[in-house]
Amino acid sequence: MPRGLTLLSLVQADDSETLGVKLSNGILDVALAGKTLNLVVPTTLDELLAHGDVAALERLIAAAKDKPEFLKDEGTIKFGRLFANPGKIVCVGLNYKAHAEEAGEKLPKVPILFNKYNNTLAAHNCTIKLPPREVSYKFDYETELLVVIGKTARNVSEAEALDYVAGYAVGHDFSARDLQFDTGGQWMVGKTLDGFAPIGPYFVSADLVDPNNLAIETFVNDEAQPRQSSRTSKFIFNPQKVISYASKLFALEPGDIIFTGTPEGVIIGMPKEKQVWLKAGDRIISRIEKLGTLKFDLA
């Protein structure tokens, strides 16, 4: 599994999405460097995680890191999707005590699991195209820590669970609350419209992050105060517990991703007279300590 690395996805001129490495002197274009130097190397994060060929990537970094022709200014790149084809997108509901309370729900005794599909995957700085009002209009934010699995986990203990994690990222479980709740409790439907899972800007390898003590925030537009502000230390079920629990139900495979739940402060948790749903033109900013700031717009 990758160690000591911060990775991202670049959109190339032909619209392909390829791997980048964030270095102190710029963004290393892995595909360009590999092709020019005639080195066989994984060119997407999905490929890197599936095949585990970290050594090849490390050899490329060593060969190309000081060559300006392979480096790009981060301010000039277009970010691609970090993940395009994970085997599973697992989500955890009601995983912060204060969030469960604001939603008027009982604290869960085991992790509440649901899913998204690959059509939801979107990039940092993306624009989510909202559906017509007659389909949905109660749009809500949910900033979440994303856990990325690095090796197959079956029936793992909590004590060993983090050994199966490749890294972490900022994820956003964008939600249509009317579809989720007003049509009979269809969580999957309310979470799975196109583009409803922006992730990024970075994948940070697990050795660089303590997932159990990170600040997590959400901002809307130019508001100075965050809508959500908490720490991952307030999880009901921390990543170890979620991974262990899920691995007893089904195998977690390299490249699978887990949205670990959102803290309090969401719109659905406000009194009805104060619920002002997100709309076209809004900009959402999701920030998690050590993982960067994910931004996206609504249209």
Image: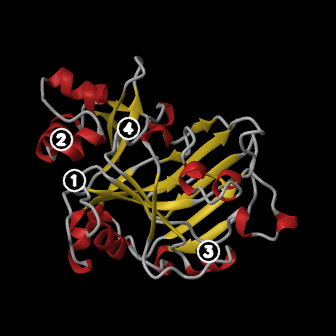
- Marks 2 and 3 sit apart, C-alpha to C-alpha, by 40 Å
Q: What residue appears at the point 16 percent right and 47 percent down from the top-left corner?
A: 52
Q: Secondary structure at mark 1?
A: loop
Q: Nearer the viewer, residue 42 or 67?
A: 42
Q: Secondary structure at mark 3?
A: helix
The type of residue carrying mark 3 is His
Residue that label 2 marks = 57
The image position of residue 114, as x and y in percent, is: 46, 59
Q: Is residue 257 above or below residue 160?
A: above
> Mark 3 and 4 residues: CB-CB less than 8 Å, in contact?
no
The image position of residue 42, as x and y in percent, is: 20, 36
- Marks 2 and 4 sit apart, C-alpha to C-alpha, by 19 Å
Residue that label 3 marks = 99
Q: Which mark is residue 84?
A: 4
Q: Secondary structure at mark 2?
A: helix
- Marks 2 and 1 sit apart, C-alpha to C-alpha, by 9 Å
